[in-house]
């Protein structure tokens, strides 16, 4: 298991971080979508509680952190985000990772409505499930397998991560955004990396690797 302090240089503006001239058109489009997300999130948050005061005051840092996480995790294939809320970190990650297809699960109807709106506004490759995880999995196609699962501070991972075992791709990963570097033992999953993120004093990205357990 590795522990890494993430280089804060990656938290520069997304546009400034892209130096390849050939990628400028793509970068400009992604930057515009990040700005759309920020604008719409703040606009909707005036009417419904999508994010708290701390996130509003530091929204640029939260978005930059999500972009940084996408750089660490490099999402591909099918990606599940559980407890998507106002879209942090999943929406910025989806914006900068168009090659991945994101499945966002959120049970709060008002937050679910915002997520549907922002997926349309930003033309994201994403599906929204307005339900609890236990019921959302019943809507998944039987062939669906996730290469990556993400979640920010939602419940106790040892309670909900095991339920996703049948939906994980071989060598799939779970990435937890949380205030501690520690994760309890979870059958079928092995803790692999801990990244210390620069926003705040206790801010970690912990990754787990899925493996099939064979009887002895």
Image (cartoon, rainbow, N blue to C red):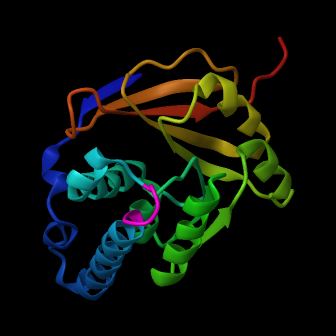
Instruction: Tally the numbered discs.
Output: 0
* Magenta residues, start to end: 45-50
The C terminus appears in which quarter of the rendering? top right
Q: Which residue sits at x=77%, y=52%?
A: 136
Q: Nearer the viewer, residue 58 or 170?
A: 58
Residue 58 visible in the picture = no
Residue that sits furthest to the bottom in the current view: 25
Query: Could you say where residue 144 lies in the image, as x and y percent from the top left?
Result: 77, 57
Question: Residue 184's quadrant in the figure?
Answer: top right
User: Is 49 one of the magenta-colored residues?
Assistant: yes
Q: Residue furthest front?
A: 47
Q: Is residue 166 visible?
A: yes
Q: Is residue 49 above or below residue 186?
A: below
Q: Name the quadrant of the N terminus.
A: top left
Determine if the magenta segment contains residue 177: no
107 over 182 or under it: above or below: below
Q: Determine whether, in the image, residue 22 is placed left or right of residue 122.
A: left
In the displayed structure, does residue 100 sit left or right of residue 107? left
Magenta span: predominant SS is loop
Q: Position of residue 125 (x, y in %)?
A: 56, 74
Q: Position of residue 48 (x, y in %)?
A: 46, 61
């Amino acid at each position: 298991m590795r522990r890494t302090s993430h280089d804060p240089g990656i938290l520069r503006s997304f546009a400034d971080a892209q130096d390849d001239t050939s990628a400028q058109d793509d970068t400009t489009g992604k930057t515009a979508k990040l700005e759309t997300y920020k604008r719409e999130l703040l606009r909707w948050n005036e009417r419904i509680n999508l994010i708290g005061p701390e996130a509003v005051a530091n929204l640029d840092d939260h978005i930059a952190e999500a972009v940084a996480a996408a750089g660490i995790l490099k999402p591909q294939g099918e990606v599940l985000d559980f407890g998507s809320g106002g879209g942090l970190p999943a929406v910025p990650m989806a914006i900068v990772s168009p090659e991945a297809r994101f499945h966002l699960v959120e049970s709060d109807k008002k937050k679910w409505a915002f997520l549907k709106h922002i997926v349309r506004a930003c033309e994201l490759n994403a599906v929204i499930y307005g339900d609890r995880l236990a019921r959302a999995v019943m809507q998944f196609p039987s062939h669906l397998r996730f290469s990556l699962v993400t979640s920010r501070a939602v419940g106790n991972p040892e309670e909900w991560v095991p339920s996703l075992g049948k939906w994980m791709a071989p060598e799939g990963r779970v990435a937890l955004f949380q205030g501690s570097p520690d994760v309890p033992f979870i059958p079928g999953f092995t803790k692999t990396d801990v990244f210390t993120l620069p926003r705040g004093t206790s801010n970690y990205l912990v990754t787990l690797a899925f493996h099939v357990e064979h009887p002895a």
